[in-house]
Amino acid sequence: MAEYEPGNVLVTGGAGFIGANFVRFWRRRYPENRLVVLDALTYAGNRSSLADLEGREHFHFVHGDIRDQSLVEELLRRHELRTIVHFAAESHVDRSIAGPDAFISTNIQGTHSLLKAARQVWLEETGAGSHRFHHVSTDEVYGSLGPADPGFSEATAYAPNSPYSASKAASDHLVRAYHHTFGLAVTTSNCSNNYGPYQFPEKLIPLMLINVLEGRPLPVYGDGLNVRDWLHVDDHNRAIELVLRKGRVGDTYNIGGNSERTNLDIVRLLCRLMDERFAGNPTLGERFAGAPGARGLPSDELIAFVSDRPGHDRRYAVDAGKISGELGYRPRESFDTGIDKTIDWYLANEAWWRAVMDGSYQDWVRHHYGRGVD
Ligand code: NAD
Ligand code: TYD
């Protein structure tokens, strides 16, 4: 089967964590193709994550909303875009518990708005030429696993448990329906927890890293024994390219990192790796005077068990057999190599994370993590 040539690409949510890494990856892979980023720059979107690309040939940043259908149609026409890689979303489970409405609006209505724009321009106006709508989704749509259950496969029934995962599940169904009913050429990928550079410090790994550096408590929810499968963002983006180029239209592909860990194991490992870095590099103690490592103390003294997240899914694990067998996907990073690189990135990019942690975010963290410290 001939591979799909993605041509000019619209990346939604390209100023967010995975999107910003994808944009960099894609620019290296396809420097001659036009790449348009559409991002509403919510608290999670940071133009600084793409600063070095601004003004470059074939790169365009558009500050706008995926719910603005006429804007999206205009971009598809003007830039002759025939591929959409759709990352834009509200993505944090805790926020979906505190306020689900934004998740319904962006993740469900926003995805529907994008689908309508793609259908209008690619099917109604251009006449079903070569095009692709790739939807980036999550393994959380499958719900929670018991300790001995096999990982989620593409055949696992959807059973989302949080407003976030329910909104992603709804968007997955809409993408599927636009293929089945209208013939839009779609693919969907459902991946496990990503980590790596440019991740907003509300998610487990960057939050814990920065709290260690600042000497703040490390809030572990419940007993800390919930399990996630960790996927390095570069492996995720390579997998998306495989799905785009070689995936079957209308199909979904699960992407995993083959790295199941409990949250407590992750936090303890991060503490140990940070202790080693402080011990081996005295300038770190000068830069981060509030960190336990600056005083030769172990970082894990900061671990604080806090009350559990409501409805907290116990375990996620991904069976990546389909994408490995059919498309040849293999993660390149082990958790050990990936986490080392990620720590180095956060240490080398203090200015980035300080800039993104603005006043409103700090207020939110104080409000949110002020609860239930035992
Ligand atoms: P993120 O929260 O870091 O970034 C989301 C981006 O979308 C931000 O730049 C934000 O400004 C933008 N955005 C939000 N609402 C928008 C709107 N209405 N219009 C335009 N832009 C808007 O998210 P992420 O972690 O990079 O996740 C990207 C995608 O991958 C999401 O769809 C998420 O559900 C999915 N996913 C993420 C993970 C993970 O571990 N991070 C795992 C599985 C799936
Ligand atoms: P998170 O990074 O929010 O991703 P998700 O909820 O999408 O899996 O959380 C990863 C795991 O870490 C999850 O089981 C919740 C837990 N967690 C904590 O224990 N403490 C925290 O401060 C955060 C943010 C998460």
Image: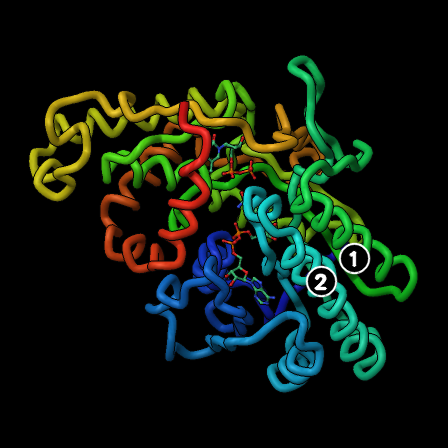
Residue placed at 50% from the left, 64% from the top?
Answer: 42
Q: Which residue is mark 2?
A: 111
**Residue 94 position by quadrant:** top right
Query: Which marked residue is nearer to the observer: mark 2 or mark 1?
Result: 2
How many marks are shown on the rendered structure?
A: 2
Decide: few, some or many residues near mark 1? Use Cα within 10 Å; few <14, some 14-19, many ≥20: many
**Residue 321 position by quadrant:** top right
Q: At label 2, which amino acid type do we have?
A: Thr
On residue 175, the disc is 1
Q: Tell me which numbered mark, 2 or 1, is placed earlier along the sequence.
A: 2
Residue sitting nearer the eye, 265 or 240: 265
Q: Residue furthest right?
A: 181
Q: Are marks 2 and 1 in contact (CB under 8 Å)?
A: yes
Q: Is residue 349 visible?
A: yes
Which quadrant: the C terminus?
Answer: top left
Residue placed at 16% from the left, 40% from the top?
Answer: 288
Residue placed at 48% from the left, 21% from the top?
Answer: 224
Q: At label 1, which amino acid type do we have?
A: Val
Residue sitting nearer the eye, 282 or 370: 370
